[in-house]
Amino acid sequence: MKPRDAPIGIFDSGVGGLSVWRAIRALLPAEDLIYVADQAHVPYGPRRLEEVRDFSLGITRFLLSAGAKIIVIACNTASAAALRELRQLYPAVPFVGMEPAVKPAAERTQTGVVGVLATPATFQGALYASVVERFAADVRLLQHTCPGLVQQIEAGALHAPETRAILEQALTPMLAAGIDTVVLGCTHYPFVIPLIEEVTKGRARVIDPAPAIARQVKRVLAARNALQPVGRMGKAQFYSTASTGQLASLLPQLLGFSAPVRPLHWRGGALSPE
């Protein structure tokens, strides 16, 4: 096990995992965080699971080389593609992945109809199928892949008419069918919760999975006696596999502060900071 002062590694295809970063920082302010945005390959959602698995393996190797004591796969698609294999390859490393919050939605719905917004790869993955089988037998799930929504969020267009149109196309039929709960099955989507709430006009509860992921990270580290002592402010490092300026320009909008972003380069399936 890595020492307490080792960082938490977090990765996603782009800026979506920053919604999880934000929740972890709020709950564990003393922890050092390393975030990798694989913007050279964003979005992951339409890609083959085998391809996403390869990306996830490369990023994991980089984060472990940087000393990460735990790795958070802050991406539903990457979790569906790679979580099981990563745990098999690195049994001594704790991994926390994402799964659509179908269980709490099924427990809270009053109408018995739940909307799920996620990428095609997430819907096709065994992880999603398992969650549905275990927790949603008595619930009607309405699914939508929201084509183009990840790209709008990556561009910082959180309130643009095009972004609203994508959400209206997804949610209007669901509302007509009686949903009272919306599950966000992509870590990008919490950044447009205000717009989702405008579209639903308060008729549907929105479930953001990020706080639950942060609590799980805390539980795992506490069980391993690997939490940083309180009373310090953790450091943050940000990396991008594409233009560092793109991620840097979005940090103030998405996280409320500016920070330098370091470049990473893919070479033969491996990541290098040079």
Image: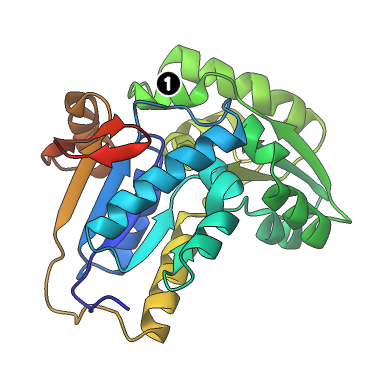
Residue with the mark numbered 1: 152
Give the residue drawn at x 45%, y 34%: 192
Residue furthest to the right in view is 138
Identify the image quadrant of the C terminus. top left
Across and down, in percent, residue 53 comes to 52, 42
Q: Nearer the viewer, residue 147 or 36?
A: 36
In which quadrant will I find the N terminus? bottom left
The correct choice, above or below, for 222 with respect to 120 in the image is below
Q: Residue 143's spot in the image, x, y percent?
A: 73, 34
Could one spot residue 109 in this view of the protein?
no
Looking at the image, is 232 positioned above or below residue 110? Answer: below
Q: Nearer the viewer, residue 173 or 213?
A: 213
How many residues crowd mark 1 within 10 Å: few (<14), some (14–19), many (20+)? some
The disc labelled 1 sits on which kind of residue? Gln
Residue drawn at the location 55% of the way across and 49% of the way down: 82
Q: Which residue is more in the foreground, 185 or 3? A: 3
Q: Position of residue 229 (x, y in %)?
A: 19, 82
